[in-house]
Image: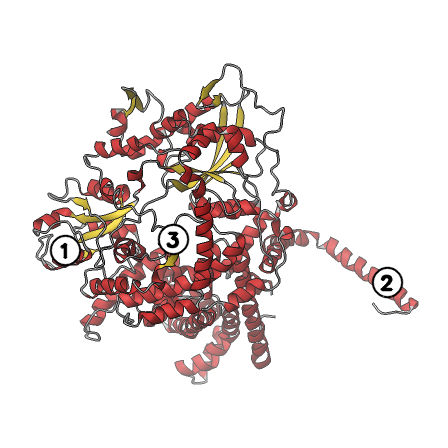
Amino acid sequence: MNVAKRKLALLLPVLALLVTLVSACGGSNNEGGNAAEPSASPGTPGGTSAPVEGSRSVGGLQVPIVADKLELSLWSPSGGNFRGTNFNEKYSFQQMEENTNIHIDFQHSTEASAEAFSLLMSSGKLPDIIYNDLWGTDSGKYGAQGALLPLEDLIDKYAPNFKKLLDDHPDIRGQITSPEGHIYYLPNLVLDSQDLTQMFPQVRSDWVEKLGLSMPQTTEDWYNMLKAFREQDPNGNGKKDEIPLVTVNLENIMMLFAPAFGVEYGFFVDNGEVKFGPDDPRFKEVVAYLNRLYEEQLLDPNYLVDTTFQTLTEKVTTDVAGAWFGWSGSYMGNFTTLMEGKHDTFKIAAAIPPKGPNGDQRHVSFRWQAAAHGLAVSSKTAHPEEVMKWLDYQYSEEGILLNNFGVEGKSYDLVNGEPVYKEEVTHPTNGLTNTQELLNHTIGGGSWATVADTRYAEQIREANGQTENPLEIYKDYIDFDAKLPPVQFTAEENEIVVPLMADIQTYVAETVNAQIMGRQSFDDYDKVIKQLEQMGIGEVLKQYQTAYERFKGE
Amino acid sequence: MAVPVNAIKAKSRKQRTKRSSVSLKRMMANRYLYLMLLPTVLYFLIFEYKPMYGAVIAFKDFNPFAGVAGSPWVGFKNFEKFFESYYFFRLLKNTFLMSFYSLLFIFPASLAFALLLNELRIKKLKSFLQTVSYLPHFISLIVICGMIIDFTKPGGIINSLLLGIGIISEPIQFLIQPEWFRTIYVGSGMWQSLGWNSIIYLAALSGINPSLYEAAVVDGAGRWKQLTHITLPGILPTVLILLILNVGTLLNVGWDKIILLYNPGTYVTADVISTFVYRRGVMEADYSFSAAVGLFNSVINFTLLVLANRISRKTTESSLW
């Protein structure tokens, strides 16, 4: 009997996972009830608000923040963008401790961040400050649950630097405010519009030159170019082994072509109205176009199976891939570095967003000024005031320099008032790439609750021999009106959206792929739209519209 | 208790104390044995039974910060959400079919493999075959799936093989065609587990008294008669118990393998309850919902287990309990 039961329990991975989650938070049940209330009320008189002796002002913030060294805990995953071991080993944070007199006890997870994060949150044992890259949707949810501290009042009282940013850039406030009107996290900020572009189409420009073509301007140009890649043997090995368009998922292909037909693969805004791409009659044209690419083997026939960056890298570096859609650094930069010295002509260029048959042309693969990643304050902190001040320091001029460039004299020098990286950083001799070396010194301005400095990417790019900025050309195409802003839902709205979208996403993914691959006809696309209506897309859109209008109103 | 007569009450109390003192005495006598049992009992209490309490979140709107006890009750809402899901019946059908085919093909195949191995008289060949067939069991699932993807590609060995012997004239895109998914799932499952599953049969086979075979040979039984009259009846209880256990997990399919292999092109046949829950509950941190689905799954499994056990006990007298 026991054996049978145990076996049952063992063989139920999903249940088992949940069970762990639940048992993990069993210990916190007693405190659980009080979690919703901050354990110390912010701004109580007699706090530490009196300036510390011998302090100076950084944009209105007095540092050092406290007279006696204070320790705060901060949770963050250590993988991915951050690399490195404990953040206290980064010179920038050591300097920051000296300046603020606050020691940060960094608690790092080693597992994948999303899973580790949800385990942390369900454990109920929270540090003072929490890093996450999904605060855009998570902060409202966890805020409403009482896990996070609403920060608006604290910002007003203790965060002069961040407050000034909010006042100077009024759009940001809406991007980080929950439906209930609370700010639960401080985001990574990008203030220069040219740096907002994230992913863009990339083409083997040496192939384009070799075949006597020019960089594609329209969707028809793209078709012709891909066809030439397929048929005219641009890699010159005598075999028809070229895969003109490669991708790790359908979403990227959609980001490339759907805007040219006036739609998106997901939600977008059309003259102030939120729409769902596959529910729009124009979407049929996208499917028809992609079906044509697929039928003529211009789109990688294995695109549904080869879904890792590794397989894509393999195709690019073995000289068979012609075009793809990806990031500036991790795609374009990476491939260029990998092929250095291994290929005579290998060259990648950025293509502008293609113009569709009806004249639509726009770039929607950009991020908002306020990113979804940043730092939130847990409701359990005993030092809300100090935490807020320390966070504000990240947005002070001093903090921005530390986070982007590191410590002056160690990783950069001031030349005519401009920070310039030292040679050891841009051209390290210790076997690391310059990005990696830089991460020994600093957290990196693009992945922290701070302002990303344009000069950072610029100098690294120049150090890598890329004289022109591939992102510059997108500035003119960025369409802020068409991209759905980071709207947040109330619990009630979520209750409607989540279950309906679970089925709709499945249906759309299934149908669109089948139609692209020609297993299902796209002629009667009306049927798809009818089916979506039946599955409740109208109800979902209503919630989106409400959330969007609430966002606009703020 | 109803209204027992005082005398009976007194008597039974007396008996009880007497009995309990006897058993206490016995326990004291065997105290070291009980001490040795203690860790196991504790293990089950702490790690297997206590967590079961967490399953109540299936009936709650679970909020980690309010805790299990503090989260509001919502009744069967999470179950209703699942049953009302557009794809509910497809998920149920896929889950059932996938496990049913696994049971149908892998279970007898392991038995047949064990019997064949048992008949092998060359010791070295036997252990070689055994080792080779175990190997896939020890390969990480990620690697297995990588191999499956490579094997089934248009240029992979399966296509090359089929093209080579002329069964097909054009390579098949196995992994994007829904009609192939179950075949690949069950086929690779067989490759993975055949050798390993046969171990328990081989163990049961070695437990059969050799004198039975000697006697049978004296009586003039050939290899086939030995198989049907000694070997099969000899391992039948083992086979049945394994079958019951397998039936008890009929709705559990290897979700991780499916997640690594499926894609929107094959959802039609590949999407099962657990993958749906993964996309829906775990990715979106909807714990209560996933718990409800998990609970639904275990209730069905448990019912099947009890049924299979009962049928087996009635018909063959071997059963789990």
Q: Which residue is mark 2?
A: B13
Say what secondary structure mark 2 lies in. Answer: helix
The location of residue B215, given as percent across then percent down, is: 48, 80
Determine the image quadrant of residue A225: bottom left
Image depth: mark 1 or mark 2 in front? 1
Taking the image as shown, residue A147 lies to the left or right of residue A414, namely right
**Crowding near the residue tagged with mark 3, few <14, some 14–19, many ≥20 C-alpha atoms within 10 Å:** some
Q: Which residue is mark 3?
A: A272
Position of residue A463 in the picture relative to residue A149 (left or right): left
Element carrying mark 3:
loop
What residue do we see at 59% from left, 57% from top? B57
Residue B115 placement (x, y as % from top left): 41, 73
What number is the disc on residue A225?
A: 1
The residue that appears at 23% across and 51% down in the rendered structure is A324
Q: What's the residue at 53%, 53% (across, down)? A: A491
Q: Chain of mark 2?
A: B
Is residue A26 something that shows in the picture? yes
Label 1 vs 3, first from the N-terminus: 1
